[in-house]
Amino acid sequence: MNTVALAFDLGGTELRGALVERSGDVIARVSAPTLAGAGSEAVIGQIITLADKLLKQHPQAKVVGIGMCAPGPLDPKAGIVIGPPTLAGWHNVPLIDILSRQFGLPVRLENDANAAALGEWRFGAGRGTGSLVFVTVSTGIGGGVVADGHIYHGRRGLAAEIGHMTITGEGDRCFCGAIGCFEAVASGTALGRQATRLTAPGDGSLLRRLAKDGDISARHVVEAARTGDATACRLVEAEARWLGIGFTNLLHLYSPNLIVMGGGLANGFDLLAPGIRATVEERAMQAYRDVPIVPAELGDRAGLVGAASLILWEGEPGTALAMVQNDETRSGAGGQDEPALAPRA
Ligand SMILES: [Zn+2]
């Protein structure tokens, strides 16, 4: 039996677990609806139950550690889930401490979008590239940046919260409280909301028929656009333009070799791509226009395999993570929080 990692992807609606090999192959998967309203102890109980199930399926598995991803904000280095809006009762939960004590194994924690970026970079659409930006567009918009061979973390691991970059001065209020966030105008939720506003129950439109006269979702818009429905096609065009504007910002900020788009709306990537491309051509400076924008390849296992790779790839000589770790070790001794320009005593 090969060496494997236990991997968990803690979401606001679903908790997923897997056993993952070093190749990124998932040899077992389990999931449960997250007890999101029940507080951290209940959910940690679910993690333990799922781990038992996985290990029963593969009693010979040589588990070397646990890679875990959860919604931000979280501090990957300190191993603390700070307070995700989708999970009630999680305030500064020291998840790495709790799980490593429970299982007696090394545990690594990463923001879910960063873990998915790692997964796509190591095993999916971004294999072999040095820098990429991963953007997940579904209920919200999240992202992760792999820069020069490692995840870009920033202060407290909070970097690349790209859903909340301000992209316009008007429109609906974002759940974060601000107006004009990328997420507020371009998420799947925003797309569905626009479609719902443009139509009315019982108006006979294809969009409303697909939604059985209820609220329209992004999935319905993509489905209707595939049949050539004029309203849906206009909505897809507007959506592609917002995505193109956001992606142009990301190109200018990070200069990646590749932008990878995942999340539920990636199901409509083929419909969105021409509009995204046209907007980037129009708005990005010349030197950034030829960067490929591609759909994600790993679907909902990107976070799991990315989290597992934190355990399975860690410390291998010559890997980016080994380099990051060395940096951390070095700066840990010298007080990395000192201002870079502090006068020398
Ligand atoms: Zn926001």
Image (cartoon, grey):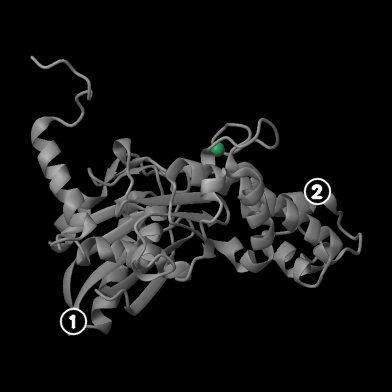
Q: Where is residue 126 in the image (x, y as percent from the top left)?
A: 41, 64
- Quadrant that contains the C terminus: top left
- The answer to whether residue 219 is above or below residue 328 is below
User: Are there few (<14), some (14-19), or many (20+) residues within 10 Å of tag 1?
Assistant: few
The answer to whether residue 292 of the structure is visible from this angle is yes
- Sequence order check, earlier mark of 2 and 1: 1
The answer to whether residue 38 of the structure is visible from this angle is no
User: Are there few (<14), some (14-19), or many (20+) residues within 10 Å of tag 2?
Assistant: few
In terms of secondary structure, where does tag 2 sit? helix
Q: Residue 322 carries which label?
A: none
Which residue type carries mark 2?
A: Arg
- The answer to whether residue 210 is above or below residue 335 is below
Please report the residue visible at 43 percent of the width from the left and 52 percent of the height from the top: 256
Q: Which of 82 and 276 is in front in this view?
A: 276
Q: Residue 197 carries which label?
A: 2
Q: Position of residue 121 (x, y in %)?
A: 37, 63
Q: Which of 23 and 148 is in front in this view?
A: 148
For residue 236, side relative to residue 320 (left or right): right
The tally of labels here is 2
* Distance between mark 2 and mark 1 Cα atoms: 53 Å
Please report the residue visible at 33 percent of the width from the left and 63 percent of the height from the top: 306
Please report the residue visible at 37 percent of the width from the left and 68 percent of the height from the top: 127
Q: What residue is shown with label 1?
A: 2
Label 2 CB-ligand 1 distance < 8 A: no
- The answer to whether residue 274 is above or below residue 146 is below
